[in-house]
């Protein structure tokens, strides 16, 4: 679908308009200027006085037409903030005309970003009432009442789980990336390498990771900075041996400050084929009882198609083994819209989940990530249409509500089926604090290990600085000292600024 945009020459409109077009059409290209042969043409008019007025008339080669307009005040702010408001108005009008054209209603309105709930948190922190905040989401962003209610439920659960959510900026969380898996799944774009035959890489990688943990831990100790949560992800952190896990957690207790009072430590054991009695014993030894055991699906043919080499029976067996070994907070991931699956298959997965009843459940909607095997071979991996995917999400919402789970975090991704979302559910009191931290961006998260991304948050302004370790083990092994040094330099600047500001404030 080739879409010509006339009347908007600023290239900064290109990406948001392309993201919106992708919500409506599987394959689309947006051109701001110079396209004479287009499937759809949108003629925009933009007027700026003390207000912003945007209008658009859309027509297609089939002579279909639609038009819309939107007006709001031009804020007295910086040029950057003013353009942000202008972009929002343009997006509003573009979504409206495309909804008229296609009949597809976008329940998330103009939002294409990852973290919708962060927007609601911000409005409530500004002192707006719940009614005022909801009205702004509805009228300014076109978000449906259904999604606003979901956002509100999640915000309330987060504040119940972390009452000091708005003041944890003086603490940090730690993400530790283990870049190895038994095999690589077809939908995956995480830094993950098949572990078989790579023991040399594993040994070198773990040496670098231990170094990072010691250096960052020493820095935190010297400045008396608390750790809120620690999350071992990847890859699959339980791909390494029990002995390697034991040494890794010993390093954590030795290097990190006040580990006994860290609010939550999570280890993803997502691939059931990596879970052994010995590894579970190591986890219990170090007082770690929050893990993931991820079925993704309970349909054997699906698991084979996406490259998961465990069986349905193995998932169930390893879940019960984890329970027997003292894992008291187990998360399970399910994916909606996997190849070959519709509502009947997803209902089988929900029925099997009912027999296990993990403390938390993350329901993902399949996303066609650019670098994944599944995206490169879309003809091979046939997925359900939008309406079927929506029915599966509705089934998940109904099932979780009837079984005592409530939503506590969500995030969205580009190219996600049905423009839906990924939602984490839990029974009361078993929410993942780390998931709340990473989604709401209320503190710095320091990434250690291969492919680990750090997000450094300026404590006063909330500005985020990203820093990523290299994804492949060899590059990481060659340079881990340099990356550690760079992260410490960023931390020095952030926390030095914070202390300076506090010194200047009147008592």
Image (cartoon, grey):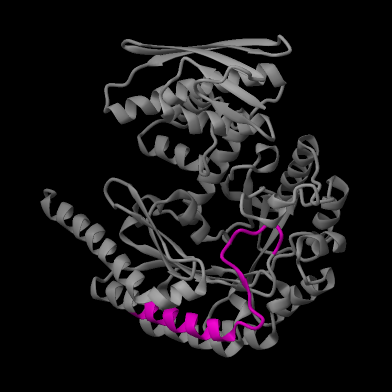
Residue 172 vertical position relative to residue 260 in the rendered view, above or below? above
Drawn side of residue 413 relative to residue 351, left or right: left
Q: Nearer the viewer, residue 454 or 444?
A: 454
Q: Residue at x 74, y 63 (%)?
A: 357
Q: Residue at x 40, y 39 (%)?
A: 122
Q: Quadrant of the N terminus?
A: top right
Q: Nearer the viewer, residue 8 or 176?
A: 8
**199 drawn magenta:** yes
On the image, the x and y values in percent for residue 262 come to: 42, 71
Where are the magenta residues, as a range? 185-214
**389 drawn magenta:** no
Drawn side of residue 357 relative to residue 141, left or right: right
On the image, the x and y values in percent for residue 234 come to: 56, 68
Residue 269 vertical position relative to residue 501 in the rendered view, above or below? below
On the image, the x and y values in percent for residue 176 come to: 48, 70
Residue 421 vertical position relative to residue 323 in the rendered view, above or below? above
């Amino acid at each position: 679908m080739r879409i010509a945009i006339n009347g908007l020459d600023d290239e900064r409109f290109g990406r948001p308009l392309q993201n919106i077009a992708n919500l409506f059409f599987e394959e689309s290209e947006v051109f701001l200027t110079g396209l004479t042969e287009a499937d759809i043409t949108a003629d925009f008019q933009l007027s700026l006085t003390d207000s912003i007025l945007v209008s658009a008339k859309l027509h297609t080669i089939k002579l279909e037409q639609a038009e819309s307009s939107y007006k709001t005040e031009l804020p007295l702010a910086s040029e950057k903030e003013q353009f942000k408001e202008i972009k929002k108005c343009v997006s509003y009008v573009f979504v409206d005309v495309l909804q008229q054209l296609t009949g597809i209603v976008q329940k998330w309105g103009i939002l294409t970003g990852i973290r919708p709930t962060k927007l609601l948190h911000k409005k409530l922190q500004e002192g707006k009432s719940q009614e005022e905040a909801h009205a702004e989401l509805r009228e300014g962003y076109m978000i449906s009442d259904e999604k606003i209610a979901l956002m509100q439920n999640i915000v309330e659960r987060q504040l119940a789980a972390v009452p000091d959510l708005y003041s944890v900026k003086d603490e940090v969380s730690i993400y530790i990336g283990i870049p190895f898996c038994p095999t690589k799944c077809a939908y995956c774009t995480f830094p993950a390498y098949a572990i078989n035959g790579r023991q040399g890489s594993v040994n070198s990688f773990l040496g670098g990771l231990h170094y990072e943990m010691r250096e960052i831990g020493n820095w935190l100790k010297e400045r008396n900075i608390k750790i809120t949560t620690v999350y071992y992800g990847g890859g699959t952190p339980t791909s390494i041996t029990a002995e390697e896990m034991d040494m890794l957690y010993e390093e954590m207790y030795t290097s990190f400050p006040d580990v006994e009072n860290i609010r939550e430590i999570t280890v993803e054991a997502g691939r059931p084929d990596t879970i052994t009695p010995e590894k579970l014993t190591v986890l219990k030894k170090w007082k770690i009882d929050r893990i993931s055991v991820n079925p993704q699906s309970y349909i054997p043919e699906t698991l084979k198609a996406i490259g998961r080499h465990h069986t349905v029976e193995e998932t169930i067996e390893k879940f019960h083994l984890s329970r027997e070994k003292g894992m008291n907070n187990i998360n399970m991931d399910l994916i909606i819209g996997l190849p070959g699956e519709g509502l009947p298959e997803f209902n089988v997965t929900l029925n099997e989940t009912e027999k296990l009843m993990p403390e938390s459940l993350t329901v993902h909607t399949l996303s066609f990530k650019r670098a994944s095997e599944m995206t490169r071979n879309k003809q091979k991996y046939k997925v359900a249409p939008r309406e079927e995917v929506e029915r599966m999400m509705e089934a998940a919402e109904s099932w979780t509500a009837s079984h005592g789970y409530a939503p506590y975090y969500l995030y969205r991704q580009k190219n996600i089926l049905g423009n839906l979302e990924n939602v984490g559910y839990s029974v009361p009191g078993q929410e993942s604090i780390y998931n709340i931290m990473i989604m709401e961006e209320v503190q710095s998260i320091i990434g250690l290990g291969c492919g680990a991304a750090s997000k450094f948050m300026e404590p006063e302004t909330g500005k985020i600085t990203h820093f990523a370790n290299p994804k492949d083990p060899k590059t990481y092994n060659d340079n881990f000292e340099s990356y550690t040094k760079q992260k410490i330099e960023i931390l020095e600047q952030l926390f030095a600024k914070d202390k300076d500001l506090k010194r200047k404030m009147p008592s």
